[in-house]
Amino acid sequence: PQLDSFPTDFLWGSASAAYQVEGAWDADGKGPSVWDNFVKIPGTTFKSSNGQVAVDHYHRYQEDVALMAEQGLKAYRFSIAWSRIFPTGKGEINQVGLEFYSNLIDELLKHDIEPIVTIYHWDLPQALQDEYQGWESRQIIEDFTTYAKLLFDTYGDRVKYWVSLNEQNVFIMHGYMMGTHPPAVRDPKRMYAANHIANLANASVIKAFREGGYSGKIGPSFAFAPAYPLDCRPENILAYENISDMSAHFWMDVYAFGRYPRIMLKNLEKMGLLPEITESDLALLKEGKPDFMGLNYYQTMTVANNPLDGVGMSGEANYTGEKGSTQESGMPGLFKMVENPYLERTNWDWTIDHQGLRVALRRIASRYDLPVLITENGLGEFDTLETDGTVHDQGRIDYLQHHCLAIQEAISDGVEVMGYCTWSFTDLLSWLNGYQKRYGFVYVDRDETSEKELTRYKKDSFYWYQEVINSNGQSLTK
Ligand code: GCO
């Protein structure tokens, strides 16, 4: 059957995050973030890589935007470093920081590229961590809202799309349960408490956006890895129900409906992990309904029954790029992750599943009836820069091609998809995997011994996406 065309105003975009691209970590009055400090602790990142220089986007943003314009990008999603604006998280404003993003926004608009601004992409001002333990204190709700309002007031005349929190599920779980992100806590009780506060902060910012009467749209970006049951064995279906409530509904129901799934509440109560949730909290959550669901999609997961004495959370991720080094993990009595025999994996053991994107889009549309903005999707790979300056990343082209077609199928199914931001435009710092895991359309030389360090090179995928954008997706089915 004929597929529906992409809407004419479809936002063909690409994305990044401040800490992963900007560098200039202490320039022009910027305060330190928790990531600036965390990476200094030995063993936290692959080969101690950090974002001090990153790809130097702070100084090269004009060159980067020129490349975006050459490609024909319709939208660029980037994040604002909170501690560039408020070096200590609140109080005094750093005007130079505000200006940097103002210039970036103007540069994008000059080339007809729609800015999509992420308000929080993990780089919490260190001062707020020191003063009141960041996300573990309700004080952050007010500080985060003040910061967001300043952004709305300063850029709201030019920015029409806002992402409130990026991957709350990831920064909370890694930061407070697995201990692999700052503040490196491993305590489920503290995790659920911090998560509830993050939900309140998210709702408070969306509420402020509504009350301020700003035009445009706002929503969170959620890292959604849809789950599949291993097979039709009823125990495995229950494992699938468990993981769906725990890993998807537990966050997205709160965003969309302002309430937690009741199965999860009961679960947390039984485990003694239920955070304090007041009546006024619930009222605030209800006022935080987003305009869209931001979807960061990379992979699906497959689960099976896990007995009470079964495997627990390993917390061991694969940072090295060696296939097969991720450990078994699960939650005893609830589910365990299993291999999906139908799917290939990337070098970092992420499943490659374009149909999973269609599944993700449909699940969001069916359960939440919200439009979806795909805020991230892409392939992390070792790319090779040839001596003539080319990069042949056919694997990435295939990956993106299949995912774009899956979007078109979802649109034909009836899902309202606003746009697609690939991850990422230029290569950038992978938080834990350093610079060897590359995602960009544009290769960035990060070889410290090279005279051409930080030089940009267009990969084959750059030209492939250029054609997709140019033809509004028609080249996909040619
Ligand atoms: C990585 C990750 C990130 C994330 C992004 C999440 O390798 O570090 O893939 O780049 O996808 O920051 O929003």
Image: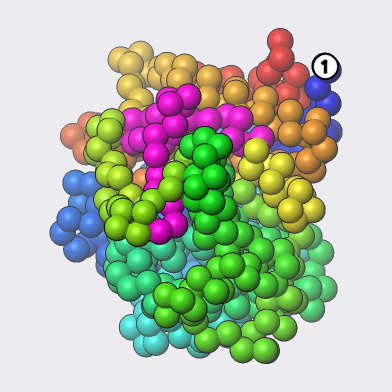
Q: Position of residue 277 (x, y in %)?
A: 58, 85
Q: Position of residue 397 (x, y in %)?
A: 52, 21
Look at mark 1 in the image and give the residue it sits on: 1
Note whether ligand 1 is within 8 Å of mark 1: no
Looking at the image, is 242 positioned above or below residue 4? below
Q: In this image, 333 relative to 145: left or right?
A: left
| Number of on-image labels | 1
Q: Nearer the viewer, residue 297 or 300?
A: 300
Above or below, comparing residue 247 to residue 426 in the picture: below
Describe residue 37's horizontal placement relative to residue 100 as left or right: left
Which one is nearer the viewer's eye here, 226 or 442? 226
Element type at marker 1?
loop
Percent of width and height locating residue 419: 71, 41
Residue 188 position in % (x across, y down): 37, 72
Residue positioned 84% across, 33% down in the render = 8
Q: Which residues are magenta?
A: 333-358
Tell me if I can see residue 49 in this picture: no
Question: What residue is rendered at 68% in x and 18% in y?
Answer: 476
Judge whether residue 344 is colored magenta: yes
Quadrant of the snapshot with the N terminus: top right
Residue 387 or 304: which is nearer the viewer? 304
